[in-house]
Amino acid sequence: MKYDVIIAGASFAGLAVASRVKGNILLIDKQDVGLNETSACAAPYSLVKRIAGEEVIFQVFEKAKVHTVLDEIDFDLNNLYCTFDYKKFCESFFKKIQVEFVKAKVKTFNEGKVITDKGEFQSDCIVDATGWRAVLASSLEKNFVDRTKLSFGIETVLDFKTDEMHFYFYNNSKTIKDGYAWVFPVGKMARFGIGSYGRNPSLKKKLAKFLDEFGLEVNSVYGGFFPHEFREPVVGKIFLAGDSAGHCLPLTGEGIRTAIYFGEVCGDIIQEIIDKKLTLEEGLSKYKNVVVSHRRYFDVLERKQSTFSSISDFWVTQLFKYTRLKPVYQYAMNKYESLGFLFGSKKGME
């Protein structure tokens, strides 16, 4: 059987692609939809509400607090953010789409066929949304994934009550270096996490030391790698979306809205191919042009990530204080948010 489109990966990007396509669609993932959470699951409130509804949201935030070794800086958020339930979000998203789902491990791609441990599946339109490993693209280009360009984060959920999102930047600290930590409230609980810009993937001891500040101990941990470098969005005749294509923003590590945005773009273009408005080659070229036209934003953030990691705690504090100045803050946030992924819709980068 030949499908109109095969999507490998059923998280944010894969579900976003599927949501924009009507036809004979196959969605493949090694886990049931909504399992294997690796994200901190904080995103713009309007985006989460649009995709999955209010019922998946834990808590909504108007403010964020940045902690440095020397000070605490409060920020009013330009747009509301929220924490949400990953499983419920994905299940709600999945219910809105019409696809055939196969629970299988994707192994490789060969001559128009996706090879899995449950058999081979064929389509002209193939989407790699398998995450940072980019399984299908890597089967065509062995060195496609640059492991030196991966960040790493882990998180644990504990009893802790707060009404703000908290970010911790301690550049000269042995606890947090070349990255940052966070506390994201989820009602009566909170997600405590720590991330590294790729230099130190062994973070559990550092997370434990961070939690000592709150008199808490590490519970069960989840997390993983995510790319901080923009990748090619098309490899051979495969579309890539989400972490497969390096759509996670450097510096901040934000990847949900970017994955959904590019997933929706990808899905719209694939629908044009299915409707014979575009050939496959034209669709691949169109998608690549749309995505690559925004590469400069990712490159700027990657340079800022490199610079930020090298400065002292004094200058980290001064930078955040300067950024808090209203004209500077509005300019910076407008630039960041106008990376195109506007909060309630798929507009802004088109």
Image (tube, rainbow, N blue to C red):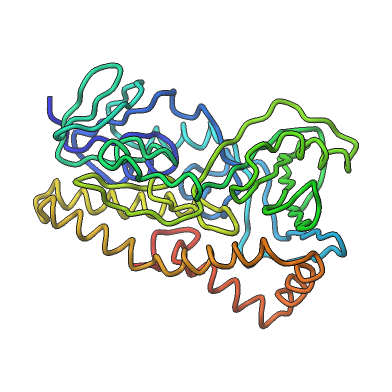
Q: Residue at x 28, y 16 (%)?
A: 118
**In the displayed structure, does residue 36 sit left or right of residue 184?**
left
Q: Quadrant of the C terminus?
A: bottom left
- Residue 295, how many percent across, how many down? 40, 65
Quadrant including the N terminus? top left
Asked if residue 65 is positioned above or below residue 161 in the image, the reply reads below
Q: Residue 178: horizontal and vertical position, in percent?
A: 68, 54
Residue depicted at x 29% and y 51%: 266
Q: Nearer the viewer, residue 232 or 9?
A: 232
Residue occupying image coordinates x 57% and y 44%: 54
- Left or right: 75, with 227 as reference point: right
- Name the image quarter holding residue 220: top right
Tell me which residue sits at (29%, 33%) in the image.
98
Examine the image and state in which quarter residue 328 appears: bottom right
**Whole-percent x, y for residue 106 in the image:** 32, 27
- Choose between 15 and 284: the one closer to the eye: 284
Q: Residue furthest bottom?
A: 327
